[in-house]
Amino acid sequence: VRPAGLAERAEPYTADILVSVASQANDTFSIAVVLFVSATISAANSVWGRSCSPFGAHEKLPLVWGEQGHVPFSACDFERMPTSLPLPNLQDRRAWRAVLTSVSSRASFAASTDFSAGEHYVSLVPPAMGEFELSLELGGEPVD
């Protein structure tokens, strides 16, 4: 069984394999196969948005000063398949880090990353009026 192309998920994939034995007593057996797929998140393949195919990472996103905004991003594996586990976890200690940087002054502000109902997003409140750039990294590796 090859897990290529199978998305990571909490529930296992299941299938039945029929094995036929030709001998003095011919018989067919059904063998249940249970497959768990876990994936390592790749910062290089993770993207802004709710799917693992890139969408205009450099688009402007209007936020209201003083109000919390949420910017979704997708944690993707090396095959650009979405993963649905939060980081850090027991198997992967890397953490997401989001930074909001003022275009005019280059002052940087930390933004928080959250995980809820299987989705990742950056929660932020613009600290002032103006234009900002939002960057994201995973364990020190930038997300494009």
Image: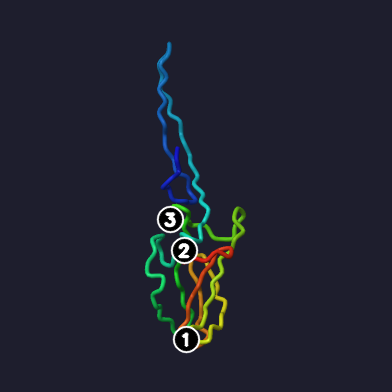
Residue 80's tag is 3
Mark with earlier residue (1, 2): 1
Q: Name which quarter of the figure residue 23 lies in.
A: top left
Helix, strand, or loop for circle 2? strand
Q: Residue at x 47, y 86 (%)?
A: 65
CA separation in Å, label 3 and label 1: 34 Å
Residue 119's tag is 2
Helix, strand, or loop for circle 1? loop
Mark with earlier residue (3, 2): 3
* Residue 5 located left or right of residue 100: left
Colour pattern = rainbow
Q: Residue at x 48, y 78 (%)?
A: 133
Q: Would you call the spot at circle 2 few (<14 residues within 10 Å), some (14-19), or many (20 or more)?
A: some
The amino acid type, in three-letter code, at marker 3 is: Arg
* Residue sitting at the far bottom: 129
Q: Name which quarter of the figure residue 13 lies in.
A: top left
